Amino acid sequence: MFDTLTKAPGDKILALMGEYAADSRTDKIDLGVGVYKDEQGITPIMTSVKKAEQRIFAAAKTKTYLGIAGNKGYGAAVLDLALGDSVDRSRVRVAQAPGGTGSLWVLMQLIHRAKPGATVWVSDPTWPNHNPIAENSGLQVKTYPYFDAETRGVKFEQMLATLDGLGKDDVVLLHGCCHNPTGANLSDAQWDQVAASLARTGALPFIDLAYLGFGDGLLEDAYGTRKVVSSVPEALVAFSGSKNFQLYRERVGAAILIAKNAAQADVAQSQLLNIIRGAYSQPPDHGAEIIRVILEDPELRAEWETELNAMRARMIGLRQKLSDAIRQRSNSKDFDFIAAHRGMFSLLGLPNSVVEHLKATNGVYMIGDSRINVAGIPEERVGDLADALLAAIK
Ligand SMILES: Cc1ncc(COP(=O)(O)O)c(C=O)c1O
């Protein structure tokens, strides 16, 4: 059987992690892998998560199945967190899914059932996993203009012009906040325009909400999602709890659908549950139960928000420090965009030759497209990093 197979391409980020681990330089800097890191360079378990786990272990009596949609309390809590009261819940359905990726996957499958071969429009560039998830679900992928390599902001007019030309058979995948890989995000006013465009054209918005709370705040980061879902009859949202609860390996996410009315929501949900049943039957519970416990308990929730706020403040602080250090050394505003970007990433807009040079000469590791993870910047090395960047682009 297997002699018919040829080797699949390896994952570039995992390969880079391997290269970094094998690099014996003690002053190397890892800006590659997309996980949050603290001052010590580790990806810690949040204290609120630890406390929730202790409660869960103390109270647990059974490991019996929970059902295809997973943990119901979790689903309701995530809807509150992501959507608030932006849309009438009678039109909303949710199914817990394995991570943001699993949520994207089951929702892409749902799109395929509703409209086989529909076109999913993704930002140029986008998270590299969007394309295979859509294509493996039998959907077409096309791109809309997004990142402006000159300003390192969003090419908003071109983006909107493309969206304005779409129709009912199109799906528009939007990063709800903290765009990966660019770090360039829409303003609230631009979200308003995107929402109005989607309402006009009838294209289906599909929001990937993987970094809620990592940009400007939980409410601020939910603005775009809430604006869009409150403006259109139908929408999809893929939520991830991997980053904001630091639960990466627990694989916790949620597939959310908003339909025209309750009856259509029930039909769409029945298809979604049918997809899940035929794929992995039911989602894993542990991460979802942690999130449920935290969000339902006012004290734990406050503690989690404090921890999340501190992580976000650290990333914003590192952004400011790096752009200040570059400005001081070069007297140029060319890297000010790092401070203006939000989320864990910034796309520096450097050619691959410069990325390779930084790795070889300075032991500075970033993704080949020049995406850096700002949480990976060691605070005491900001000056070294600024020097290395400026020397490399000379
Ligand atoms: C844009 C985006 N969407 C979705 C995900 C999915 O994350 P997970 O499946 O780990 O929850 C990620 C993770 O890196 C991401 O960056």
Image: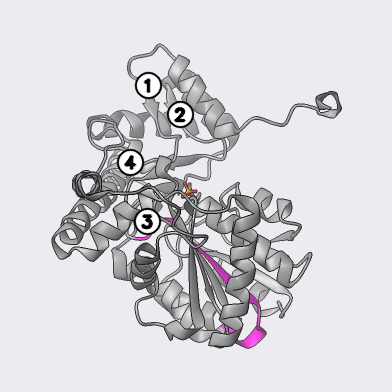
Rendered view: 366 above or below 218: above
Along the viewing direction, whichever of 140 and 292 lies nearer the viewer? 292
Along the viewing direction, whichever of 197 and 335 lies nearer the viewer? 197
Which residue is outermost to the right?
Answer: 4
Residue at (74%, 75%) from the top-left corner?
Answer: 169
Q: Identify the mark at residue 28; answer none if there is no mark.
A: 1
Residue flagged by tag 4: what amino acid is it?
A: Ala
Quarter where residue 31 is shown: top left
Determine the secondary structure under disc 2: strand
Rendered view: 278 above or below 237: above
Q: Identify the mark at residue 342; answer none if there is no mark.
A: 3
Q: Identify the mark at residue 375; answer none if there is no mark.
A: 4
Q: Is residue 145 visible?
A: no
Determine the secondary structure under disc 3: loop
Quick one: label 1, few (<14), some, or many (20+) residues within 10 Å? some
Q: Reading the chain from its start, which is encountered first: label 2 or label 4?
A: 2
Determine the secondary structure under disc 1: loop
Residue flagged by tag 3: what amino acid is it?
A: Arg
